[in-house]
Image (tube, grey):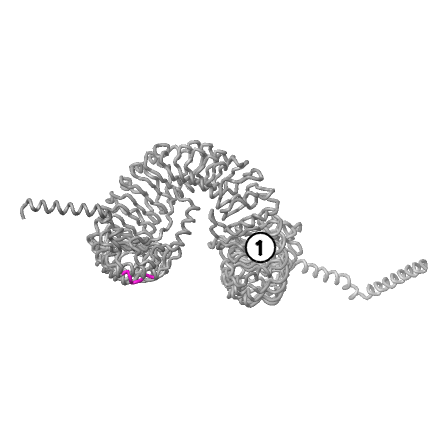
Amino acid sequence: MTRKGSLRFIAVTLTLFLCLLTTHPNFCTADSEVRCMESERHALLNFKQDLTDPSNRLASWAAAASDEDCCDWVGVVCHNRTGHVLKLRLRAFYPLYDELTTDDAQLDTQYEAYERSVLGGKINPSLLDLKHLIYLDLSYNDFGGAHIPKFLGSMGSLRYLNLSHARFGGLIPRQLGNLSNLHYLNLGDSNYYNDLYVENLQWLSGLPLLQHLDMSSANLSQVSDWLHDINKLPSLLELQLSYCYLSGFISPIPSSINFSSLTTLDLSYNSFENSSILFWVSGLHNLVSLDLSHNQFQGPIPVHLHNLTSLGHLDLSSNTFNSSIPNWLYSFSHLEFLNLRENNLQGTISSSIGNLTSVISLDLSTNEHEGKFPRSLGKLCKLRVIRLSDNKWSQEISEIFESLSGCVSNGLEILDLSNAQLSGQLTDELGQFKNLVILSLGNNSISGPIPWSIGNLSSLRSLKLETNQINGTLPPSFGHLSKLESLNIYSNMLEGVVSEVHFTNLMRLTKLVASQNRLTLEVSDNWNPPFQVNNLVLGSWILGPKFPSWLCSQEQLSILDISNTGILDAVPPSFWNLSSQLTYLNLSHNQIYGEIPNISMILSYSSIIDMSSNNFTGVLPCTSSNVGVLDLSDNSLSGSISHFLCYKMNESKRMSYLNLGRNLLSGEMADCWMMWQNLFTLNLGNNNLSGSIPTSIGYLIYLGSLHLYNNKFSGKLPSSLKNCTNLVTLDIGKNEFVGSIPSWIGHRFSSLVILSLHSNNFYGYIPEKLCSLTSLQILDLSNNKLFGSIPRCIDNFNAMATNNNSNGPLFLLEQSIGYGTSMLFETALLVIKGKVLEYSTILQFVKSIDLSKNNLSGKIPEEVTSLQGLQSLNLSFNILIGRIPDNIGVMGSLESIDFSANQLSGQIPQSMSSLTFLSQLNLSNNNLSGKIPSSSQLQSLNASCFIGNKLCGAPLIENCSIIDVKPNVENKRSKDFGRLEVDWFYVSMALGFVVGFWAVLGPLLFNKQWRIMYFQFLDHLGYKLWGVVAQTWLHCK
């Protein structure tokens, strides 16, 4: 063909093509001409059939219309020319939290939507029919622990596989190593849900093109040579192995690293200790992000990291590095994010930190840094986040504001200096941080008023000034903070009036924590707040005497604390309608009256309700089974508790803390405890309850504290109580229980710290099995009918033998309530130093034994002196005999001793004078004798402590007849008579009687004339007396 003919042919062809385009304008479009393959359409429908889809996300995947193009289905991406399915994007979108931008209420809504949107079920093998699939993303769904299908390893076209956060479990199939085209593999999950594990990683060698590998939270503890296996991935750019139970290497570290192009390395949340294993990291010169946080690295920050000058993100937080920050770190000019929090880093921060000119976020919190706040931070113009809390700056806050007055003040968004030993006053320089979003200065010693300039922080969303010494009034400029969402001024010294002006523009406020101040809220009766808060904590404010009716407008309320606010009123009925949304309600320590309606509609899990110390009347309200803590103590509630205990017996109760003490409840305790198995604390003390303890009490296997004090319970302790083996406190004093003290208390309640059985009708011997209670600190068996001797094994009370109090406070409850932690402490009424005292927060420091008012006999066992941590010992009103133990002086912690009203004899031991903490002593009404030992403690006591004995010396007025005789030194002669003491007063009296007797009768016996004259004298005297008597008798007649 000639050239001319060829040109003519091309021209004709182009003309025909243009005509065709004109006639069919959609000729090249996929919508009209390119459709998904029918076989692949059926494969997708089969895949959908085995999925659960509660929110109907895959509604577009319809099977009804055969002409439906699957390329238009949600999550399906097809090739625009062939129509083959290339990608399945079926991830669920977990809400992301950003403390600078995320709204808490919006986050909750997003999370609820996410939970509804997750796919589940199982993976159908029909995916194998998608021969051209290169992209599969099922992340953030919930497959309920199902195994990763092995057949996925046969999908050879896959380049992208993302199964992260999808709740897969079991052994990761080695068949995944057949995906030789794979570039991206993500099997990671959070630490709480991932049940994946591997036996080895040798299958990774089949993935030569892999660039991204994430196996976070998969258990790799069985893989000792994981680094060698990963070293076979030469294309690797990102490696994430957090939460993988890694601790080191068994095999040698590779001599060279093949993945030298690695840019991201995450080994966080493992158990690495020796930083020498990181030598291989120093060769990763392209590394941009390194995360070694939450391991167990020790010593100085590894010097071999100094070559990683390209780093933009470095996280070494939550280790135990204990050096100062090395100077070479300050030369990382590309570093944008530096996190060294929660280590033991020490010393001052060098001014060279100003060389980190690219830094955006700096976190050095929770270390041992001290000295001055580095002024060079003020020159870091890109810095947006400064976290230096929990250090020892010991500086005035005004100096820090001055240091940050440079260009950093223009862009700073987060400033956290809480718990940093700061002092001084807040100044107007605070107003310079106009872009500040979060300001945390809590837990310091900052004083003075809040400056008016705080109203200039127009971007502020969170302000924390809690636990300082800030005083004065709350400035009205608070009303200018239109973006404020969270305000915490808890535990300061603020006072004065808070009015509607302070809340004018706070329409975004969701959290207000302001308790433990002396503020007064003055608003109109019809005030309608501009905000809808979730957390409202105003304890110790003055809100009363009327109940604040504006609370009824807070429809989003979940946490409410208006305790101790001077309310003297009834609760309006509309307020009780909020109960279904509350997770924490505290109305305690007011004078609120009226009846409490049934709280059966509370839906929140483990809700906390505290209405204690009010004037509520009526019967106990029935409560939802979801209530976790209920405190109605110290009210005037009356009637039976049976309807309360037996309410909804078909539902297991979640309640762990129940306090109904100090009310007027009466009647017998119903046998309905079988559904209350989560109870840890039960307090029914100070009521009028009667009858025996029901056997179902044995179902409370988690019970740690039982208070039945001051009721009218009777009968014997049920044997089922022995099932409550976790008891720490058993207080059943002031009742009418009978029988002997069960010996099983000693071996079943091994954790018992407080045992109070006083003022009952228990009789018999004190069981020696009680000596097995080695943790016991308080033993009160007083005012019963016990007899026999005090067990000599008393020295087995190990907790009383030491001054250590390592167990800490006796918590009944420690629970997070959104704005902090709610802590309830164990309480106990004890007779110490002659007074009835209630102990709570310091109860763990009290160690006491009270066996008074029984019929105990025998001697005080010498073994009691081994209890050298004991503070109070009361054995009064028994029939104890013998001497006070000579070495009682070694019980150096004793503050109170009462041995009164016994039959103790002998002298007061000289060693008692060494009891320097002794402030209460009663030895009255015994048979003690001798001189009272000399000491500042004993001589300062009242004389009544020693009366009813044969004692002498101060503080008694009786002087001792023998001076300077030590009471405990025995007369040598007395030792010859079986150690019997000689009382010379009686010896002298007997000798005088003998001498007087023989001085008068001796001469009469040996002299006859004297004898006749003596009897004549007696006869004459008798006649005269008879005459006088006779005359008197006649005169009277």
In the rendered view, tell whether residue 996 sits above or below residue 913: below
Can residue 615 be seen from the camera position used here? yes
Residue at coordinates 82% horizontally, 65% vertically from top-left?
Answer: 1011
Where are the magenta residues, as a range? 122-127
Going by the image, does 123 lie left or right of 1019?
Answer: left
Residue closest to the eye, 730 or 543 = 543
Residue closest to the eye, 859 or 118 = 118
Residue at coordinates 45% horizontally, 42% vertically from top-left?
Answer: 486
Say which amino acid is labelled 1.
Asn
Which residue is identified by label 1?
Answer: 598
Instruction: Name which quarter of the figure residue 123 lies in.
Output: bottom left
Going by the image, does 550 lie left or right of 1027?
Answer: left
Residue closest to the eye, 287 or 594 = 594
In the rendered view, tell whether residue 492 sits above or below residue 136: above
Residue at coordinates 48% horizontally, 50% vertically from top-left?
Answer: 817
Picture coordinates of residue 588 (x, y %)? 57, 48
Picture coordinates of residue 575 (x, y %)? 56, 48
